Image (cartoon, rainbow, N blue to C red):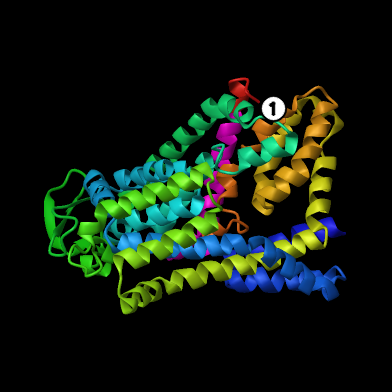
């Protein structure tokens, strides 16, 4: 009964947000509350929600201060050279733009934090997508999938969880998986190229004479045709003025060119401290945001203005996280997650025992999408490892296979970072999900296939 209700609750949530019948926040709160009553545990709803909020509060705090920190860094111009460099490389070719998105997301993902990756990637690429009239779900889909593949880094979370749950060395899990993950990353770049070709076909081949200048002309080059100047237009889509995108405005009053190297050093130090785990990430971003505001904007009114400028993102993301706490709290508190996992593991045919690594890889796609990484790696993975051990499959193979689903996991409604991505990109979560899931699942299967081919899994 709990198994059926658990899957039904998740399906109801996904259908309603993809059909845009409910906002993600409303769906994350109302649907689990309703199902909690169906289960007969309505009296315990408060306990489940408080427990869920308690577990996600550090994440919400981290996201709030991370948004303020990186928002301030964008305001003061830290990422302007990166943005301009990417724009010059991409020019106005949709193929280069989408591939550049994948490359940037993959590089920034080296810090191991999805929220940071999405904030930097969207900040750099959003203006160009808007100026060229490109699809924003292409940007969010490519960025999320690239980050999902890179999320398997030992300091990214899943590998450490798998190593802890099965009492293994993280390097024994990750290092042999590098070839398969490299193939997965190549698959993301190929996907970006294909999606870029689709965008180029839709928009035409565009070039911008001066992409950073508001008075620049856009030239549409039709295949086999002549160049026709069209001021302010491109592929039939209006190109907003550069002033619409403060991150590109070289005259904005928030720029602090004299403090550029201080801000760069502060950011490097912050990311280094995150990777080295010198302090909890929420504490690091809290300290970093406070220091960045104080040094760059010494006057109190200026500090308040910067916080207010990023308040929309903070409220949206923090609201999503706390709403997700209701969803995860009910799933865990009512026992739905455990029953769903037990049912899936029990549904594995006896004859598949010797192939439990393959089974684990396949199951990691839906399970890491519908569950948190903690729930999967600490709750389900040990069960799968025990089943594999009974058939002579080593726990390290099971652990490697469990990483396969991370490309899809990063678009899960239970991942707080995805709300940073869609919020900053101004994309509906349902649109992102509908577009991304199929490509992310395909990427995960490519990683699984490469792992099997190389004898890693």
Residue appearing at x 45%, y 53% in the figure: 116
Q: Is residue 186 left or right of residue 92?
A: right
Q: Which residue is mark 1?
A: 397
Any part of residue 174 in sight: yes
403 is higher (above) or lower (below) than 314: above
Q: Residue placed at 30% from the left, 60% from the top?
A: 127
Instruction: Tell me what residue is drawn at x 44 percent, y 57 percent.
Output: 137
Hey, which quadrant is residue 405 in on the image? top right
Residue 197 visible, this orientation: no
* Residue at screen point 77% across, 24% down: 393
Is 250 magenta? The answer is no
Please identify the quarter of the rendering in which residue 26 is found: bottom right
Query: What is the span of residues highlighted in magenta in the rendered image?
Result: 420-449
Tell me if residue 423 is in the magenta stretch.
Answer: yes
**Residue 400 spot, x, y in % from top left:** 65, 31
Between 392 and 301, the one lying in front of the other is 301
For residue 215, side relative to residue 106 (left or right): left
Q: Position of residue 445 (x, y in %)?
A: 59, 36
Q: Estimate how packed mark 1 is, as few (under 14), some (14 to 19) or many (20 or more) residues with alpha carbons within 10 Å.
A: many
Q: Seen from this angle, which residue lies furthest top?
A: 455
389 w.r.t. 363: above or below? above
């Amino acid at each position: 009964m709990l198994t059926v209700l658990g899957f039904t609750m998740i399906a109801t949530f996904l259908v309603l947000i993809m059909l845009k019948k409910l906002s993600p926040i409303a769906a994350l709160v109302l649907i689990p509350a309703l199902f909690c009553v169906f289960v007969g545990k309505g009296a315990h709803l408060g306990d489940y929600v408080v427990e869920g909020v308690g577990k996600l509060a550090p994440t919400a705090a981290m996201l709030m201060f991370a948004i303020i920190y990186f928002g301030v860094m964008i305001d003061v111009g830290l990422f302007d050279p990166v943005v301009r460099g990417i724009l010059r490389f991409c020019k106005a070719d949709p193929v280069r733009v989408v591939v550049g998105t994948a490359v940037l997301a993959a590089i920034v993902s080296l810090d191991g934090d999805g929220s940071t990756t999405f904030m930097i990637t969207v900040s750099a690429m959003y203006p160009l997508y808007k100026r060229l009239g490109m699809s924003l779900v292409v940007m969010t889909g490519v960025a999320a999938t690239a980050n999902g593949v890179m999320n398997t880094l030992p300091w990214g979370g899943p590998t450490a969880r798998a190593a802890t749950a099965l009492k293994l060395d993280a390097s024994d899990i990750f290092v042999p998986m590098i070839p398969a993950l490299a193939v997965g990353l190549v698959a993301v770049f190929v996907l970006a190229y294909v999606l870029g070709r689709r965008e180029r076909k839709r928009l035409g081949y565009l070039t911008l004479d001066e992409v950073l200048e508001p008075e620049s002309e856009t030239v549409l080059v039709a295949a086999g045709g002549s160049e026709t100047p069209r001021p302010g237009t491109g592929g039939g889509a209006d190109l907003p003025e550069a002033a619409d995108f403060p991150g590109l405005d070289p005259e904005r009053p928030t720029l602090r060119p004299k403090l550029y190297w201080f801000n760069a050093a502060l950011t490097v130090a912050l990311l280094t401290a995150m990777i080295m785990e010198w302090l909890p990430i929420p504490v690091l971003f809290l300290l970093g945001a406070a220091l960045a505001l104080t040094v760059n904007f010494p006057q109190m009114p200026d500090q308040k203005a910067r916080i207010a400028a990023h308040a929309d993102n903070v409220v949206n993301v923090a609201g999503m996280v706390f709403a997700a706490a209701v969803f995860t709290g009910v799933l865990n508190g009512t026992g739905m997650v455990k029953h769903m996992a037990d049912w899936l593991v029990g549904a594995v045919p006896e004859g598949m025992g010797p192939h439990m690594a393959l089974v684990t890889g396949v199951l990691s796609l839906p399970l890491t999408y519908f569950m948190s990484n903690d729930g999967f790696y600490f709750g389900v993975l040990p069960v799968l490892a025990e089943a594999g051990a009974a058939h002579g499959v080593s726990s390290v193979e099971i652990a490697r296979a469990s990483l396969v689903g991370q490309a899809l996991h990063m678009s899960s409604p239970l991942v707080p970072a995805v709300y940073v991505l869609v919020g900053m990109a101004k994309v509906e979560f349902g649109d992102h999900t509908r577009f991304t899931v199929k490509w992310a699942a395909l990427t995960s299967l490519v990683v699984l296939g490469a792992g099997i081919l190389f004898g890693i899994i």
